[in-house]
Amino acid sequence: MLDAVIVDDEIKALQSLSWELTNFSDEINVNASFTDPFEALTYLEKNTPDCLFLDIEMPTMDGFQFIQKLTNKNFPVVITTAYNQYAIKALKNEAIDYLLKPIDTDDLKDTIVKIRKFNAKNYTAERLEKILLSFNDKANHKKITFNTDGKLVFLNSEEILYAESDGNYSTIFLTDGQKIVLTKKLKEVNELLPSNSFFRIHNSYIINLNKIKEFLKTDGYVILESNHKIPVSRQKKSDFLDML
């Protein structure tokens, strides 16, 4: 049985869709339904259904804006609407399918197959991720793990030069010239890095202490082996010198 959530601003349309889903198939259970998209977003922050049936034309927030605001996207989204001009845009917004109201039984059966395939693939990926993380935790030379762009990146300390803050994002600069952008604040990144090798030298920077080439005491900068020039904040200077 698939647990579904429905979001549709029109109560009659929501009730109709709920009836159609539960009566057309014994494979779907409507777990929750919302006419207010903001209430739905709050619910989905804490709950992960097997699928979401989402209307497009809502006055306070349309369906595509709703998808962009989702913080939890670990479930398939099915667009439901009475208008067929949204099909291509729906697929571009990561919806797995598009159903026209009133819903056709055969179309719904096809959608259920897609939902099950999506969830099976995600389940396998989650299991593999847990296995990799568990192996890394037990490894003799544990690597630093970053989760970004739908993939896990495993790095040794010596591969990292420094990390830089960009508001709610952070960028990891590597010795080979590559960059990794993370949807994490620098404080969160700092917690992932081993404290014996990395130091938050400034509100906006964490450096690899093993990559320092020079410390310009008068100017308050460090020069890394890559020739990157990183400022040392006044508040951090004393602690930094203790680390050296």
Image: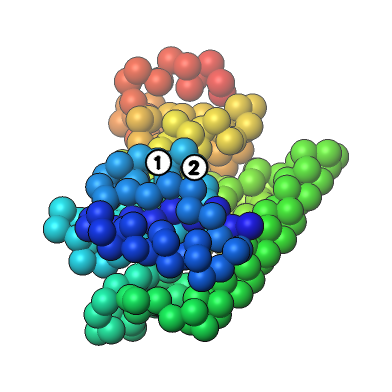
Query: Quadrant of residue 98 in the image?
Result: bottom left
Quadrant housing the N terminus: bottom right
Apparent side of residue 227 relative to residue 81 in the rendered image (left or right): right
| Residue that appears at 41% across and 59% down | 18
Place of residue 139 in the rendered image (x, y in percent of width and height, measured from the top left): 83, 42
| Residue on which disc 1 sits | 43
Q: Can you give x and y, in whole percent of width and height, for residue 169 in the image?
A: 38, 46
Residue lying at 40% horizontally and 76% vertically, measured from the top left: 103
Where 177 falls versus 240 (above or below)?
below
Q: Is residue 189 visible?
A: yes
Q: Secondary structure at mark 2?
A: loop
Distance of label 2 from label 1 (alpha carbons): 6 Å
Residue that label 2 marks: 47
Q: Are marks 2 and 1 in contact (CB under 8 Å)?
A: yes
Q: Residue at x 66, y 50 (%)?
A: 155
What x and y, as percent, mark residue 29? 54, 55
